[in-house]
Amino acid sequence: MKCSVYMLMVTECIFVLLLCSSLIHSCGLTTHTEIAHRALEYFNGKTKRGDYKTMMVKHQDAFQAGNPYPDTFFDSLCFKGRYHDISEDTHWAPFLNVTINYIRQKYPYPWDQDTEKLIVFMLGFVSHQIADITWHSLGIDQGFLETMGKIDFHGSYGDAHNVGDFGGDILNLFEIKLQYIHSLENWYVPTFDLQNIYKIYYGDGRMTADTILECSVLMFLARAGEKLAVSKLFPTYAEKSPFMLSMLNDFFLGGIDDMAAWTDNLWHTTLYMLENGTESCQIPKNPLYINCGNTSKSFLDKRKVKNGFFSKPLMHGLSPKDVLVRKSKRGAYLTLGMELKKRLRLATRKISDSTIRAQPKQVQPKAVYRVNSTYARLGWSLLNGDVNHDGYEDLIMGSPGYSVEGNYQAGRVYIVLGGPNGLPKKDLDLNKEANITIECPALCGRHSRFGSALAVVDLNADGINDLAVSAPSDLTDSLKYSGSVHVYYGPLKVGIVLQDPSANYSCQETYCNFGWTLSGGDVNSDGFADLVIGSPFAPGGGEQRGKVTVILAKKGKIDSGKFDWVQNGEQDYSWFGYSVAVKKTSLAGNWLMIGAPTFRKCALANCSFNAKDKQSVGKLYIYVLPTYKLTYSFIGSEEHAKLGSSFSVGAPFEKYTDMLAIGIPDIDVQGSVVGYSVPFHQAGGVLVYNVSNLLRDYKRLVTSFSGDRRFDRFGVTVKI
């Protein structure tokens, strides 16, 4: 038995090495398709010429073929890389400009089916163009891969890129239901129209329809190759970057949801130019800065940018013979061959079977509260508190991904009121049955993620609970990501709350993401719950140092531009304020606790990035209130431990003093499988300290707990 397990582990390692050795820089074929899919879900495509959303849904073969298209000619398998520069040019706004004008001049409205497919294909690659900007940090700062390099790869963008592009695809294939991709067995590529567009763009015939078709077939095969390889490659890529594993969807600039929001924006601009012409628009190279009369986007980025990111597709033993090609008047249809279809169905069945076998026995809940809205992220933030002043605890649920047509990730808050017997013990559809629903339609901008964080406070000091709600991605459209926090004075009334909040707070710094975390508690010992605001991605005097802001409760009119205490992080990319809490201890008074989970131990005196740094060890700061004196601090000892991601103080044992629990969710744990010592990457853990010992400057660990499997991330949330 031990021998067979060992041989299996060796075989998997060899398999992964063989696959990885063929990779150069993958461009996220699956990720690009998922971005466009999310953007389409709530896209408002209605114009005077019809409904473009309906058109995209109808022509999914052209839409999904367009999503990865700009990368088609990067690879060396495509005529030994001869057309690399073609792919480079296809990523930028001048190519979009030529495509739009080609359609306007050659195919006037009303359009036939082939022209509809060409338009849908264009909208597919438009999503790719804009997504690459924030993902690769092209012409902007602090995009996904740049931040990933700073946090997980000692500041190296190149190393992060080597892992991130293809790794993002593998994580998506493993974690997300992508049946809409795998069930689509056909692509449509408008090869002859593209040939004409390139001829106009370059002034010559260097690109032919046959060349476009041959290289598109390789891209079509790469989609299938990723599917066949996913189960083997997930652990390899997940362990290389804890940042990517935890932030792929959620990171404010270049996460999948952010790229979907920008896709929505550029689609509207593209359709405006398609219907009205490009003459009134500023079209620089970078599509992020296309401006058609929108003064908030009138700035232009002057930096020279180059994409140049490419890959050797993961073919997994496939060849062009596995694809059936049928040419049409203006394009070509690509279809999976029968044998390849069988292999893909078998791969899907194996993943499904292993998932079913791995399911532990689960305790059935008394009730399930849900919303029938895709990507809503119900429960991203959860809180209990009496918001209607009836003496009973209520359940408050943030749903920052809640979307409506035309506003992806607008956000919502749902409240279910408690009573003498607690919460309702029956299933609820919260869109219909929540007692209170809060939206922020007027003050919050599009894609603001309203409901990301919650706090029960009493800012007007009247003895009645108020509710604070954050919208950290407010002002996304202007590339500021400043964020905002809104306070609703209690008691809240039953129904849908659409009116303006009682008080509003915002941050003036770009990338502030004000209110990523919130906490309520008595900071100045006056008996009223104050508001603590964590903004871990705020500049804080550098880049993503983070900052924490305190707003004290007070009677009378509140000055929304005045903060009572502000503290910046001490290190770039340390995310000070990622977690915040005001905690009352039995022996040490009130504490303000602040986590900086990506704090690193620097090798150099000036703390510039160095290969000898210990990355993301994490740090917890404890300030004694009401003086804000930094009295205790804890720094992680292991790389990627991310100490301070979560923490809690309380007395879990009735006869003993308070305990301090600190999460280290990304730490590796040494375990064993069938008697063999095996590292469980990112298994996670929790450290427990006695508060009474801290008062004597004694930090002896009382006990610790750890996860029991890879990527468990045990300790990501800690409560006592």
Image: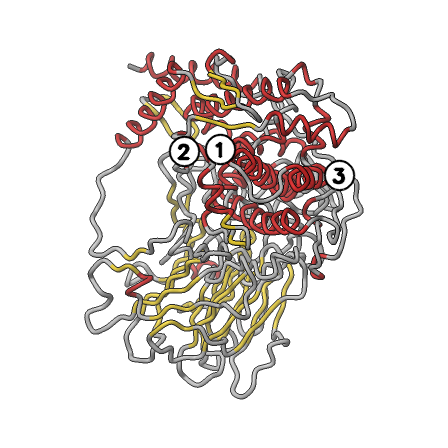
Q: Secondary structure at mark 1?
A: helix
| Residue 593, position as x, y percentages in the image | 51, 62
Looking at the picture, does residue 529 appear above or below residue 225?
A: below
Q: Mark 2 or mark 3, which is nearer the start of the sequence?
A: 3
How far apart are labels 3 and 2 at the CA level?
39 Å
| Pick the front one: 249 or 264 | 264
| Residue matched to label 2 | 710
| Residue matched to label 3 | 305
Q: Amino acid at mark 1?
A: Ala
Identified at 24% across, 66% down, the residue is: 423
| Residue matched to label 1 | 238
Q: Amino acid at mark 2?
A: Arg
How far apart are labels 3 and 1 at the CA level?
29 Å
Is residue 77 rendered to the left or right of residue 703? right
Looking at the picture, does residue 695 appear above or below residue 125?
A: below
Looking at the picture, does residue 1 appear above or below residue 536?
A: above
| Residue 86, position as x, y percentages in the image | 70, 27
Q: Amino acid at mark 3?
A: Val
Q: Quadrant of the N terminus?
A: top left
Assess disc 3: are there few (<14), some (14-19) or many (≥20) residues with their C-alpha within 10 Å of its C-alpha. Answer: some
Assess disc 2: are there few (<14), some (14-19) or many (≥20) residues with their C-alpha within 10 Å of its C-alpha. Answer: many
